[in-house]
Amino acid sequence: MSTGLSDCIEHVIRLPRSTPPILAMGAWFNNTLCITVDNQAYISKSVGHLDTPKACREHEKIARQLLAALGENPQAIAHDLHPDFYSSRFAAQLAAELDVPLIAVQHHHAHIAALCAEHHLDQPVLGLALDGIGLGTDGTAWGGELLSVHGAESIRIGHLLPLPLPGGDRAAQEPWRMAAAVLHELGRGAEITQRFTGQPAAATVAFMLQRNINCPRTSSMGRVFDAAAGLLGLCQIMEFDAQAAVALEQAATRHIHTKGWPSALAQGWHITADGQLDLLPTLAHLADERDAELGAALFHATLVAALTDWLRQATQQTGITIVVCGGGCFFNKLLSTGLHEQLNKAGHAMLIAQTVQPGDTAIALGQAWVAAQHLQVKTIAMNDVRKRFCTISIERSV
């Protein structure tokens, strides 16, 4: 591997073992790329969101720099499962140019795999992936996922109860829409226009929710944070990424610093028989809470308790005691430290990002590690076929 890459490499991660050379193209937000050589993963600096021509050109430039430094074709190119991401389309173009396999990796699997690579985990883990949105294997928008992950295999064993996104992607920029969605789910849709008098689209959103028009559902934890912030009046429309979640954490922190952690809401969540975590009871309480800072602290305390209960049940069902937590929601210190403390009390190991970050800058590393496992499984399978073929040939010759 050429060493003339210091201008574009952010991190070098030592992997648990040597892998074939793989180029991973990252996600849409905070895009990075990753290339593996032997037991090293080289992760690029972020080019930002792939929503501008400049970022896309930089993405292409770094990909070709990594390939040139490698000095040979990678054995595979990995990308996000979403086919419309620029990184996915360019991955397909490069794979065709180089005549190498293309491996799609589900977004939340990649989040957990990145941490498995960083922490040198080869055993099964419970992966708790909490973020904004990533395309799921069923074609819907995921973002609050409980996964059983072992190498190339990821099984969705639970998820947050899906909420509607009134207006689709626009709901991710306007937390009041997620608050309206919660009111609708609670049977309180008539309150939407009364609560959000400053939003000209309030009546339209209420109608959309009532008729289920342009309201795709998502299991995103990020949107639950938005809904909580919207219900408490902390943020109605965002001016920068994660503004609502940051405002919610800051409000909770102010309360906790002065009055301590409140007790979790006793009936604040419900876990269904099929593994869905329903947080609507907590959000219903927030809808009537007059003290925004207390409400924000109650939200965090109840969320930590609900996640701990969810993971406890999953551990009992699967026998897996190592919990790996990834996704942008784990930038939230109250969530990450609170959950870590509760899981430690329960005797479970909880691992989070150390060198890499919990957000999408780690996705490329996870994609590369999953692709490496795919190639390893394929190689083992091919070797088994060759052995069986040789055995049959020898028997026939005898």
Image: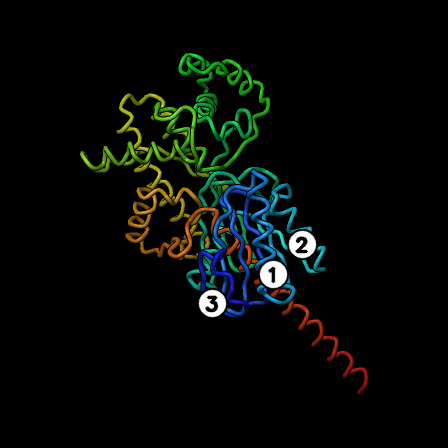
For image coordinates 51% across by 64% down, the residue present is 4
> How many C-alpha atoms fall within 10 Å of the one at disc 2: few (<14), some, or many (≥20)?
some
Q: In this view of the protein, can residue 273 be seen by the observer?
A: no
Quick check: 299 left or right of 192?
Answer: left
Mark 3 belongs to which amino acid? Pro
Q: In percent of the image, x 49 and y 31: which residue is there?
A: 172
User: Is the C-beta separation of discs 3 and 1 under 8 Å?
Assistant: no
Residue at which label 1 appears: 67
Question: Neighbour class for label 3 at 10 Å: few (<14), some, many (≥20)?
Answer: some
User: Residue 252 in the image: x percent, y percent?
Assistant: 28, 34
How crowded pointer 1 is (Cα within 10 Å; few <14, some 14-19, many 20+) is rated as some
Give coordinates of residue 88: x percent, y percent: 62, 47
Q: Residue flagged by tag 1: what amino acid is it?
A: Leu
Residue at 52% across, 41% down? 49
- Residue beneath label 2, please? 94
- The residue lying toward the viewer, choosing from 56 and 83, is 56
Which mark is on residue 16? 3
Q: What's the residue type where badge 2 is placed?
A: Leu
